[in-house]
Image: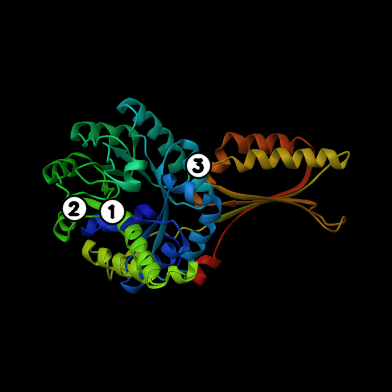
Amino acid sequence: MPLVNMRDMLYHAYENSYAVGAFDLVSLDFLEAVISAAENCRASIILSIAEPHFAHYDFELMLPAVEAAAKRASVPVSIQLDHGRSLQSTINAINLGCNGVMLDATDSPLAENIKATQSVVEMAHGCGVPVVGELGYVAGMEGEGAEQHPGEASFTNPAEAKAYVERTGVDFLAVSIGTVQGRMKERAKLDFQRLKQLNQTVSVPLVIHGGSGLNESQFRKLTALGVVKINYYTALSDLSAEVMRNQNKLNPSGSFTEMKQGVKQAIIAEVERCLRIWGGAGRAAEVLAQCEPWLPIEHLIIHNMKFNNKQQLNTAVTEGQRLLSNIPGVRGVFTGEAIKQDEKYRLCWLVHLSNKKALESFLEHADYINFSNNIILRPKTEDLLSINYLDCSSSVSG
């Protein structure tokens, strides 16, 4: 089953009053367990990679594993960057495989938050990628959440939220109504009246950060008032740590893999519990029917080029790679020279793009135009052929 458009996925939730879980991943144990749980209860999910966690793993190494797992899942899956801190972070995430991004500029004044979000929306929408914006501040109270999200919480103002959504064009809005990043010291007191007003005021579905620690009744009220995505991590982290501590008590001299026994099972049980409460269980087939598959595109250029020496060719290749690789939506660039010198087409450029929408903006991008004019056409290119290919293997294998 292919990756699916995250906007389509979440609008299905919006139209049917349930929420999709966005589970932050910090290891392969989390990744495998979250997908297993979603498959067990036939629910769509979002695999979330949070920038504050980059200190614990290499983002560029993690994404290929996440994407591979998503593509072989039997339920609809999307991959998002959570708490992206800059425009460049979101570009990197899209180019590495995310098909949803969240910008966190909540530590900036409203005008600066709007400006930063506008730039991300313009870029991401050019690649067909939906954007989650955030207004208000969900702080942490203790532990990891407090370290990553220090300070006092600031609830979302409905009037400001309306202006923010209208001026930025975000697809979804993360709001602050009393949830906490990380562990809660006591039961959360959620401002449902504020949430109701936000739901009536803004024109987009809502997102909640800090889902850990809420009870079933609170979750059901959230989904009834326009919340379509719930971010969830701390409870999974704490459960995993508890399992490992218990294993250590039982076997103090145990190995690392022995210490981890039971971690996946604990995560699976908790994710399943959440997906059933949030209303997404059993909906995988209908979600897939509504969602556009997220299928990559290959942009192929083959040609001949008259060059005086090998150095001239190497310079052109280096510059071409630099120009193309920096364009949002470009997953990778292969440049090749024919092995046989008498081939009709001596040179090729194969550009791997995230999806069909990304191809459209790619062909209009200033760097691509520069590449075409100065790398391809100006050096007396001959026998030029350019073709775009849709990846049909993903849809067949899914």
Label 3: how many Cα within 10 Å (few below 14, some 14–19, many 20+): many
Dot 1: what SS? Answer: strand
Q: Amino acid at mark 2?
A: Leu
The amino acid type of the residue labelled 3 equals Ile
Return the x and y of residue 232 as percentages of the image width and height.
31, 55
**Residue 25 seen:** yes
Mark 2 and mark 3: Cα distance apart in space? 31 Å
Q: Residue beneath label 1, please?
A: 230
In space, the residues marked 2 and 1 are separated at their CA atoms by: 9 Å
Residue at 51% across / 71% down in the picture? 397
What's the image's color scheme?
Answer: rainbow
Q: Earlier in the sequence, mark 2 or mark 1?
A: 2
Tell me, for residue 242, which label it has, or none. Answer: none
Labelled pair 2, 1 in contact (Cβ < 8 Å): yes
Could you say which quadrant of the image residue 111 lies in?
top left
Q: Amino acid at mark 1?
A: Ile
| 291, 251: nearer the viewer | 251
